[in-house]
Amino acid sequence: MSFATWWLYVAMVFVISATPGPNMLLVMVSGARHGFRAAMATMAGCLTALLGMMSLSAAGLSAILQTFPMVFDALRLVGAAYLAWLGIQLWRAPAGATDMPSDAALPQSTPAQRFRQGFLVATSNPKAILFAAAFFPQFIDPAQPQLMQFVILLLTFVVIEVSWYAIYAAGGQRITMQLRKPAVLKWFNRATGGIFVGFALLMADIRK
């Protein structure tokens, strides 16, 4: 892998990671509802899933998806159903409290549960699956030692992805004080819930 190839990878990962999607929206919502530190559990769940998929890609995930396209379709539909369920939970979350919003707006509120939520959303995200299976392997030169290339690309991805997670979580935290107002909280719940349902509909319509 040449230096120019690595820079191309950096540029493309930067844009892909910055693009709003289910992972980033979940991190932002977690930051808004629970604070930046609590959102780190959500970030860890998303990142663990992505690193796992990229590792599987190095072990031949792309070949599996090409041989068994129904695997991709199954993941896509399960992910769509999960995002729709999550969106409905957010839409229906109570917004009548006058104190700091409770964790009831998210179906899971403990760090372990937020980690699981992030893991499930990232695992079922077709964009993440396609990134790991189709995009990521293209930057590994089979004529050179592959382990070091894999490590370099993986660490590069982690730095960029975590940076964007932090930006989205901090952005969510900035609106925390506004969420003390029931009317704003109700709008926030319905807006984010509707976006998750929209992601679910788009995900269900994706074709490999």
Image (cartoon, rainbow, N blue to C red):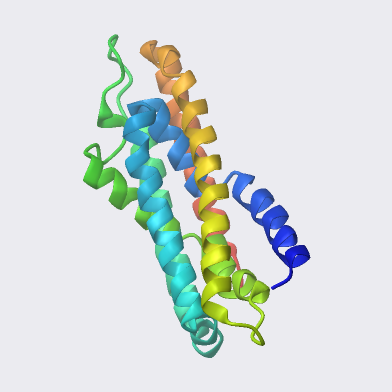
Q: Residue furthest right?
A: 4
State the image coordinates of residue 173 (x, y, percent, origin top left).
Answer: 44, 23
In this view of the protein, which residue sits in the foreground, 137 or 77?
137
State the image coordinates of residue 57 (x, y, percent, origin top left).
Answer: 50, 76
Residue 144, above or below 195? below
Q: How many marks?
A: 0
The reply, left or right, for residue 29 in relation to residue 144 is: left
Residue at the (49%, 59%) spot, across then down: 125
The reply, left or right, for residue 29 in relation to residue 205 is: left
Residue at the (63%, 76%) spot, across then down: 140
Q: Quadrant of residue 26?
A: top left
- What quarter of the picture does the C terminus occupy? bottom right
Residue 106, above or below 171? below
Residue at the (29%, 9%) spot, across then down: 98
In this view of the protein, which residue sits in the foreground, 17 or 55?
55
In this view of the protein, which residue sits in the foreground, 62 or 156?
156
State the image coordinates of residue 95 (x, y, percent, origin top left).
Answer: 33, 20
> Is residue 204 visible in the rendered structure shown here?
no
Residue 60, above or below 130? below
Residue at the (48%, 28%) spot, across then down: 170
State the image coordinates of residue 23 (x, y, percent, origin top left).
Answer: 48, 48
Q: Residue furthest bottom?
A: 67
> Is residue 177 visible in the rendered structure shown here?
yes
- What quarter of the picture does the N terminus occupy? bottom right
